Image (cartoon, rainbow, N blue to C red):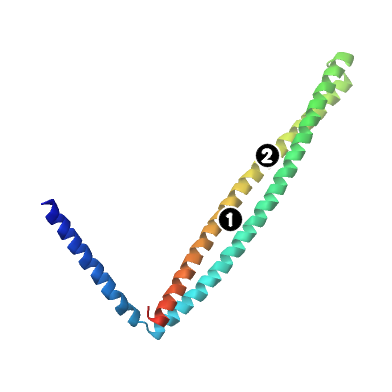
């Protein structure tokens, strides 16, 4: 029983591949000037799409580089503000001990400390925004790269079709 099923499958498989192989030369002979014209048109369009996608990808990469520079500068600013905060805290402790809690020097140190914290928090918000921008730009760049790869595949396929139409293969 098993041998009979195996025989049927092999006969059907051979018949199917025979039909497929037999129809291939017929399709190649049907190439008309219109097919060649359409293939050339497709190739030109794919080249244009490829150029646009490359330009988009390059622009996105420039945006990424810009966002990286912004992120680095914001981190430097934030770290400087944190150093100022630490310095002002120690200065406040010294002034509290030396002049008293409600002294003029202590109040001035508290104002400085508050201003430094405000600056640090603003810098941290800038860092978070730059990270978000960087993520979006990377996503756009990766999408553009995928489009480039797809356009390259389309271009290769169209060139292959054109060769097949011209040479009857």
Q: Secondary structure at mark 2?
A: helix
Drawn side of residue 168 relative to residue 114, left or right: left
In front of the other: 116 or 48: 48
Asked if residue 79 is positioned above or below residue 63 in the image, the reply reads: above
Alpha-carbon neighbours of circle 1 within 10 Å: few (<14), some, or many (≥20)? Answer: many
Where on the picture, by quarter, is residue 132?
A: top right
* Disc assigned to residue 122: none
| Image coords of residue 94 (percent x, y) | 86, 18
| Image coords of residue 29 (percent x, y) | 33, 82
Residue drawn at 12 percent across, 56 percent down: 4
Drawn side of residue 43 relative to residue 135, left or right: left
Q: Secondary structure at mark 1?
A: helix
Residue positioned most to the front: 3
Residue drawn at 51 percent across, 66 percent down: 152
Asked if residue 144 is positioned above or below residue 164 in the image, the reply reads: above
Alpha-carbon neighbours of circle 2 within 10 Å: few (<14), some, or many (≥20)? Answer: some
* Disc assigned to residue 125: 2
Residue drawn at 72 percent across, 38 percent down: 122
Residue drawn at 46 percent across, 68 percent down: 154
Residue positioned most to the left: 1
| Image coords of residue 86 (percent x, y) | 79, 26
| Image coords of residue 113 (percent x, y) | 79, 28
- Tell us which disc is closer to us: 1 or 2: 1
Asked if residue 41 is positioned above or below residue 67 in the image, the reply reads: below
In front of the other: 84 or 69: 69
In front of the other: 102 or 1: 1
Asked if residue 74 is positioned above or below residue 167 in the image, the reply reads: above
In front of the other: 148 or 26: 26
Where on the picture, by quarter, is residue 108?
A: top right
* Disc assigned to residue 141: 1
């Amino acid at each position: 029983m098993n041998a009979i099923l195996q025989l049927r499958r092999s006969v059907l498989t051979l018949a199917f591949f025979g039909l497929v192989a037999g129809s291939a030369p017929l399709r190649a002979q049907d190439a008309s000037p219109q097919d060649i014209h359409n293939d050339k048109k497709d190739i030109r369009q794919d080249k244009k799409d490829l150029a646009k996608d490359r330009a988009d990808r390059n622009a996105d990469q420039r945006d990424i580089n810009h966002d990286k520079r912004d992120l680095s500068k914001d981190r430097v600013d934030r770290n400087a503000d944190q150093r100022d905060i630490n310095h002002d805290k120690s200065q406040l402790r010294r002034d509290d001990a030396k002049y008293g809690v409600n002294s003029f020097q202590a109040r001035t140190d508290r104002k400085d400390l508050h201003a430094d914290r405000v600056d640090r928090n603003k810098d941290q918000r800038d860092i978070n925004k730059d990270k978000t921008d960087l993520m979006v730009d990377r996503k756009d760049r990766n999408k553009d790269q995928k489009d480039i790869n797809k356009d390259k595949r389309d271009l290769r396929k169209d060139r292959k079709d054109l060769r097949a139409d011209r040479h009857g293969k």
